[in-house]
Amino acid sequence: KAGVTQTPRYLIKTRGQQVTLSCSPISGHRSVSWYQQTPGQGLQFLFEYFSETQRNKGNFPGRFSGRQFSNSRSEMNVSTLELGDSALYLCASSQPGQSGETQYFGPGTRLLVL
Amino acid sequence: GNSVTQMEGPVTLSEEAFLTINCTYTATGYPSLFWYVQYPGEGLQLLLKATKADDKGSNKGFEATYRKETTSFHLEKGSVQVSDSAVYFCALSASDYKLSFGAGTTVTVRA
């Protein structure tokens, strides 16, 4: 099976712009989660979607949003970018339904905000 | 809330040395526990997991045992190689559909 794919792999944006990142889960996986990784804060949970419904959300401002489509693909959007949004954004997918199931990660999208 | 505390790095070892990375957790209920590894410029790869007390996860010579009495999930490898140089993350998943990660431990193995 193909792994989790994320596009684009690298992005450079300027402050105030918005960005959309995409994630395609492993075939058959219906849960998709997003994480932000920075040197200062480590790995922080953004949100999780299952069957197009957000089941949990981390402690991030409303500028961070996401959605999931009927084919389980997911996107996350960051509006009004700030310098501090520079990070590696990781998407993970897991088998349907069960909390505690193993999450499999994609290679990430590295976002640089100038 | 749920949290993970893991040994601060960096850790530098010689090839064939024994590696231990300590990990303790705080969680309600009965979480699943994981170790992930991240190589430079890559995402996270699952190294091993355990889903209940006294379970031992193992993979590629790495082992960790789910100890409920000490709320720990320490990672061990008996003989490390240069290729084991990476950042290792301990994580837990409880009934909240997310992974809670430790801060990560950077391991460097010298030839």
Image (cartoon, rainbow, N blue to C red):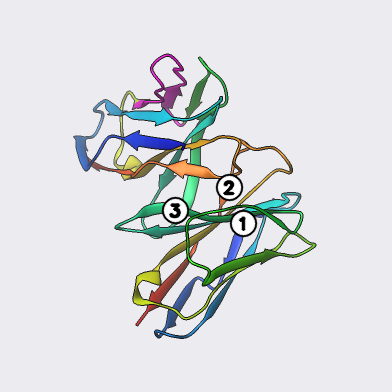
Q: Which residue is mark 1?
A: A4
Residue A92 against residue A64 in the figure, above or below: above
Tell me which secondary structure the magenta stretch mostly adopts: loop
In the rendered structure, the answer to whether residue B97 lies left or right of residue B67 reads: right
Q: Earlier in the sequence, mark 2 or mark 1?
A: 1
Amino acid carrying mark 3 in the image = Gln
Residue at x-position 70% and y-position 43%: A95
Residue A46 against residue B3 in the figure, above or below: below
Cβ–Cβ under 8 Å for marks 2 and 1: yes
- Which one is in front in this view, the residue at disc 2 or the one at disc 3? 3
In the picture, which quadrant includes the C terminus of chain A? bottom left
Q: Which residue is mark 3?
A: A44
The subunit letter for the residue under badge 2 reads A
Q: Is residue B69 magenta?
A: yes
**In the image shown, does B1 or A103 lie closer to the viewer?**
B1
Q: Does the image show residue B111? A: no
**In the image shown, does B95 or B65 lie closer to the viewer?**
B95
Instruction: Have a look at marks 3 and 1 and say if they share a chain.
Output: yes
Where in the figure is residue B13, as x and y percent of width and height? 20, 35
Residue at x-position 76% and y-position 49%: A28
In the rendered structure, the answer to whether residue B93 lies left or right of residue B37 reads: right
In the rendered structure, the answer to whether residue B43 lies left or right of residue A24 reads: left
Where in the figure is residue A51, as x and y percent of width and height? 76, 54
Where in the figure is residue B50, as x and y percent of width and height? 53, 26
Amino acid carrying mark 2 in the image = Tyr
Magenta residues span: B60-76
In the rendered structure, the answer to whether residue A73 lies left or right of residue B64 reads: right
Q: Which residue is mark 2?
A: A104
The subunit letter for the residue under badge 3 reads A
Q: Earlier in the sequence, mark 2 or mark 3?
A: 3
**Which element is circle 2 on?**
strand
